[in-house]
Amino acid sequence: MDVKDIIKEENLVYSKPSLLSDKITHYCPGCSHGVVHKLLAEVIEELGIQEKTIGVSPVGCAVFAYNYIEIDWQEAAHGRAPAVATGIARVDPDKVVFTYQGDGDLASIGTAEIMHAANRGENIVVVFINNAIYGMTGGQMAPTTLLGQVTATTPCGRDLERNGYPLKITELIGQLPGAAYVSRQSVHTPAAVRKCRKALRKSFENAMAKKGTSFVEVVSTCSSGWRLSPVEANKWMEENMFPFYPIGDIKDGQKAEAGDFMQQNLKN
Amino acid sequence: MGELRLMKGNEVIAEAAIRCGCDAYFGYPITPQSEVMETLMAREPWNQTGMVVLQAESEVASINMVYGAAGAGKKVMTSSSSPGISLMAEGISYIAGAELPCVIVNVQRGGPGLGTIQPSQADYFQSTKGGGHGDYRLIVLAPASVQEMHDFVGLAFELAFKYRNPAMILADGAIGQMMEKVELGEFVARQTTEQVDAQYGSWATTGKKKSRAKNVITSLELDSALMEQNNLRFQEKYRKMQQDEVSFEAIRCEDADYVLVAFGSSARICQKSVELARAKGIKVGLLRPITLFPFPSEPIARLAKQVKGFMTVEMNAGQMIEDVRLAVNCAGERNPVHYFGRLGGIIPTPGEVVEALEQKLIGG
Ligand SMILES: Cc1ncc(C[n+]2csc(CCOP(=O)(O)OP(=O)(O)O)c2C)c(N)n1
């Protein structure tokens, strides 16, 4: 029996987004990356911008994002995706460019690039996967790792004196005049997935309307890195990450006007 | 005859970029090359040709912006000086690995470290042997005049696109800062989106059409067997450059007993040294590599059959001398190959060069 015989067209309530490739992902069970990929594929398809969208994948677990979504991609050096996206968006202003970055990529090695891209108000979308750990390299401390959280490089838990504070980079981005929309989402329940998709859709619409930088953090799980089962990981995230990284919009609007910043009596 | 102007080497890089239809420049200020971006900003090419000029937050950002724009199939460049080029090394390696065309200008200053802002040629190894990680080569052009600063911008783009490989113009503070008469090229229109799509749509991120598979710009390949194939393809490309793109200038080498080998600023000095030596009755010639990679090994090997010896003149501790020795020795010749140079931002004088030649080659 063929799958078509089982699933009748009229009974179809859900289908895989056409832009999601059939390639089996390399992600671990319970990882949030796959869900966010699906949402991106849906939003790009919905907006009908497959031919205009250029993705920039990071160094991190999502380095192979280009294998899973059927658009043109560039793979950036670790942390440099916002600079790569700037290069593309500046020479091809008719394109819709997004970066997809982990917390090590965006909030540690690439802090300068994300700050300055958002401060210039580049018309790009930034998808920021915060799983509080370096997934790809085997679970080391990330800038977003919580105090007390055990990782491969904080075996006794993240220590304030040694490692400093967990970085709320999304709140920092929210302060920048070049940012149009800054939001923190998650994908651990169907309701959260729907909200996250709305945030992503708004971000892509902003980029198309040239409103400035749109930034969506997705508080995510890394069951392998956290050494938890997928179900336990969701629970751990809700109990420990959400209080410190509260879900919701941080800024919603568009980049500031020059007039707000010009010195009235500036003389050269 | 094109338009004639008196210009600084750095300024002419900017003018040549606009004129040859460059799509974008990304850079970060550093002496002695800041005039490149300053000239571009003053010229406002975005109003004339639509060229993008952006001051980035660092050289790390500049080179990655170059990666993005080059990946989109555009003619894109950056410029910097030695410390900034070091900072770009990872990005340059990615560009070579992803096989993207771009032009990088290095107006060298003395190192190591923050060093000096005075001219130097101490980045010869860095430029010609890789510089970043992995087995890759840059096409390296060494201008010796303001005119060549102009001409090599267009040439570097041509070679970069021909081989889909980054090309470097390796200048130094002296050529960047000096003023000379220069004949400017005609304006070449920037390529339209349709032209870029038609020419580079097979690999560049021009937007995925239904009619083609997605294009992915990446240097990553985790399957070692495939990564080895990639590397072999790169090596084949470098061999082809060695075969087809070597460029050099030979000055009074026909009857020479001794040949100076020098590039860029020091080649300018050596031109005078050749005259001084000849006035003394010493038959000296000058071989000036114009491409540092691919290196003119064959012309040097040919000269080795004729001359008594070589002396490289370099504004570094003796880097190119290794390539000259390789060229001579690999040809089975045993001519002495000496080095003379000044370091730390000091430019040798023509007289010093002749003195060194007499001491090392003739007296010795
Ligand atoms: C310059 C450089 N430094 C270090 C690395 C090694 N590295 C690869 S991925 C990674 C961290 C990735 O963590 P994150 O950005 O949080 O993404 P995740 O894997 O968790 O999705 C590191 C340090 C590298 N590839 N390049």
Image (cartoon, coloured by chain):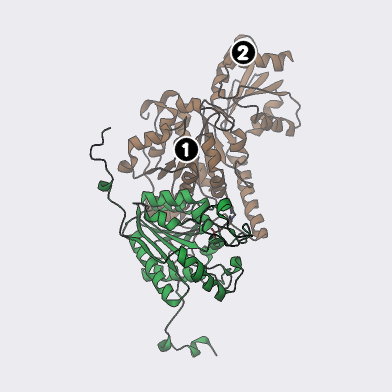
Chain colours: A green, B brown
Q: Is residue B137 above or below residue B217?
A: above
Q: Residue furthest front?
A: A161
Toward the viewer: A266 or B122? A266
Q: Earlier in the sequence, mark 2 or mark 1?
A: 1
Could you tell me which secondary element the residue under label 2 belongs to?
helix
Q: Which is in the foreground here, disc 2 or disc 1? A: 1
Quarter of the N terminus of chain A within the rendering: bottom right
Toward the viewer: A201 or B305? A201
The mark found on residue A141 in the picture is none
The mark found on residue B277 in the picture is 2
Question: What chain does badge 1 belong to?
Answer: B
Percent coordinates x, y for residue A20 in the rendering: 48, 71
Q: Residues within 10 Å of mark 2 (few under 14, many from 20)?
A: many
- Tell me if I can see residue A32 in this picture: no
Q: What residue lies at 53% left-to-right and 47% top-to-bottom?
A: B91
Q: Residues within 10 Å of mark 1 (few under 14, many from 20)?
A: many
Q: Residue furthest top?
A: B280
Toward the viewer: A67 or B74? A67
Residue linked to disc 1: B79
